[in-house]
Structures are given as C-alpha cells and as structure tokens.
C-alpha cells in the first residue's frame, strides 16, 4: 500500500509535469464500476482550470489552486499517478484521465480499485472530514510524544493510526521500530520520554530518506529492514534472527533479540 513517501513521489511527479496547464477535459478511464471517480458535474468543475499546486497530507494527494476546486486522490492498495502524452498508449487500469491543452495527460491508475478520486473545494475540508492527524513529516516531537505515548495499545498500531499521525503504514512503522530497537507490541504508555524522542527522530529520518530516493527501495541502505522482510533472515543490527507476528491485524517483522519487549 502506498505510504507517505510513495505518495510524495507522486506529488512531485504532478508538480514536475502537470502544473500550470489548462485542463481541457476530464473523462472516466476504463472499467470504472465499483470505484469512486468524479461524476460529470465534478469533472466539469475542473475543466478550464489549472493545477497551480500539488500538496500531500499523509497518504492523501491533492492537486488544485488556492481558490479551488481540487482533485483529491487516495491510492488505496496499489494506485498511482501516471503522466503521458497524447499519442502514447494510455496506462492500463487508468480510472480517470485529465487531458490538458496540448499533448499532456494525467492518469489516475488503480488496478485493485481500493483507491478513489473526487473533486473537492479544499484539502483542509477533506483532512478534517477524515479526522486525520498531523502529517508524519510535519509533526513536532512534543505532539508526537503526546499522541503515541498516551496510547494504551501496541506502539505499532499507534504509529499506523491515521487519526494520530497521517502517512505511516506497515512498512515504515516496522522500519522505525526496527531501527530504534522497539518491540512492536510495546504499549505507548510504557515508552519513556527518551524512547519517544528516538522514535520521532527515527521516523522523520526514515521517511525523509525514502522521499529523497523518490521511494526507490533499491537505493535505501542495505542494513534497513525493508530489504529483509522474511522470517528467518539474519538481523542487520545484531546476531538475532527476524520473525513475524500479527500486531493489530497486520504482519509485523522484527528482531526479538534487539527489539525487546518493555519490562
């Protein structure tokens, strides 16, 4: 599932290739049954406008202008944004097409149909409607400590709770816990101030590092957990062996040797 760094890479893609172009037409793509895309009235609101900004909050992507309207996108399990030119083959699984004056085209692609696209007035309205917490790259250490440290549940689940902080999913929650030596089932209330500070610092460093590669995992350091998410693999931080457990309904990979449970 695309998380904050993956969606940030898509935001940059729009920023680099789709801003300040007049929208000539917005049309449905192929096989739009059972997926939310804008209706004719919503699509019409975008036509004649330009995207002057592309923004992101957590896993949510927005393209629009200060006065609105905005195109809001959520990638679901496997969604993405593709830019291409008229005459090129339309991307497969394209559910919505934005045609700009000239040759440029933008496609919202979603093979599994768990994502959605809609036309909204402002990103702030969508963020509030979905009760999203602060963006994981913008949250300060004090707010992070309050939101994660007051959780009576597993820290892994708290990191992934979008109402606490927006943008972290399974992969980067596991990576943050791995690099800070924190067991995923440790309760937030059992974390001291020092550990909470370490988690905040590591989370921001990890997310920034992935964003710097435009979410190209092969460019990430070899010692990261992302390269060894298999039970039985050797830990890169100690002499331990990786294992996995379900935490909050999600499979968590960790090293029980250096990610010890809180006493």
Image (cartoon, grey):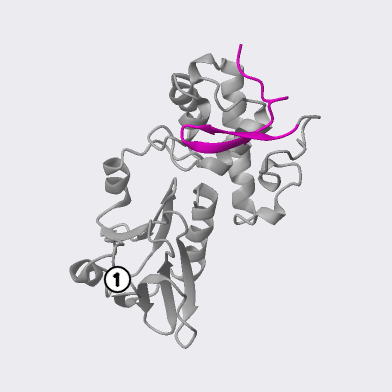
Q: Is residue 27 magenta?
A: no
Q: Which residues are magenta?
A: 241-263
Spot occupied by residue 192 in the image (x, y as percentages of width and height):
57, 15
| Residue sitting farthest toward the top | 263
Left or right? Give the position of 258 relative to 38.
right
Left or right? Give the position of 118 relative to 257.
left
Spot occupied by residue 14 in the image (x, y as percentages of width and height):
47, 65
Quadrant of the image containing the C terminus: top right
Spot occupied by residue 53 in the image (x, y as percentages of width and height):
40, 60
Label 1: which secondary element: loop
Q: In the rendered image of this protein, does residue 184 appear above or below residue 131? A: above
Determine crowd level at label 1: few under 14, some 14-19, many 20+ residues with C-alpha closer than 10 A.
Answer: many
The residue wearing badge 1 is: 49
Q: Is residue 251 magenta?
A: yes
Spot occupied by residue 216 in the image (x, y as percentages of width and height):
64, 57
Residue 72 visible in the current orientation? no
Left or right? Give the position of 20 relative to 32.
right
Q: In the rendered image of this protein, does residue 75 appear above or below residue 155? A: below
| Residue sitting farthest toward the right | 239
| Residue sitting farthest toward the bottom | 87
Which of the 4 image quadrants contains residue 259? top right
* Viewer-closest of 10 and 261: 261
Question: Measuring 42% from the left and 61% from the top, which residue is drawn there?
Answer: 112
Residue 143 visible in the current orientation? yes
Labels in figure, total: 1
Q: In the rendered image of this protein, does residue 177 appear above or below residue 261? A: below
Q: In the rendered image of this protein, does residue 49 appear above or below residue 116? A: below
* Viewer-closest of 67 and 78: 78
Question: Measuring 60% from the left and 57% from the top, which residue is drawn there?
Answer: 214
């Amino acid at each position: 599932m695309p998380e904050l760094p993956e969606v940030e890479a898509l935001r940059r893609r729009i920023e680099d290739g789709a801003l300040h172009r007049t929208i000539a037409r917005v049309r449905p793509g192929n096989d739009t049954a059972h997926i939310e895309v804008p209706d004719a009235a919503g699509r019409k609101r975008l036509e004649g406008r330009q995207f002057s900004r592309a923004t992101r909050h957590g896993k949510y992507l927005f393209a629009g202008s200060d006065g609105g309207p905005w195109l809001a996108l959520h990638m679901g399990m496997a969604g993405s944004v593709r830019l291409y030119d008229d005459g090129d083959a339309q991307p497969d699984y394209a559910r919505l097409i934005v045609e700009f004056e000239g040759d440029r085209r933008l496609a919202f692609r979603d093979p599994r149909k768990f994502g959605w696209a809609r036309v909204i007035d402002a990103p702030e309205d969508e963020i509030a409607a979905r009760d999203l917490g602060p963006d994981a790259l913008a949250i300060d250490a004090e707010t992070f400590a309050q939101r994660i440290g007051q959780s009576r549940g597993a820290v892994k689940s708290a990191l992934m709770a979008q109402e606490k902080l927006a943008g972290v999913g399974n992969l980067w929650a596991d990576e943050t816990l791995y690099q800070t030596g924190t067991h995923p089932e440790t309760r937030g209330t059992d974390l001291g101030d020092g550990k909470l500070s370490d988690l905040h610092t590591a989370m921001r460093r990890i997310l920034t590092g992935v964003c710097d590669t435009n979410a190209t995992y092969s460019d990430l350091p070899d010692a990261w957990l992302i390269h060894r998410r298999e039970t039985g693999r050797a830990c890169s931080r100690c002499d331990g062996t990786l294992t996995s457990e379900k935490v909050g309904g999600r499979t968590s990979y960790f090293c029980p040797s250096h990610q010890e449970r809180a006493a």
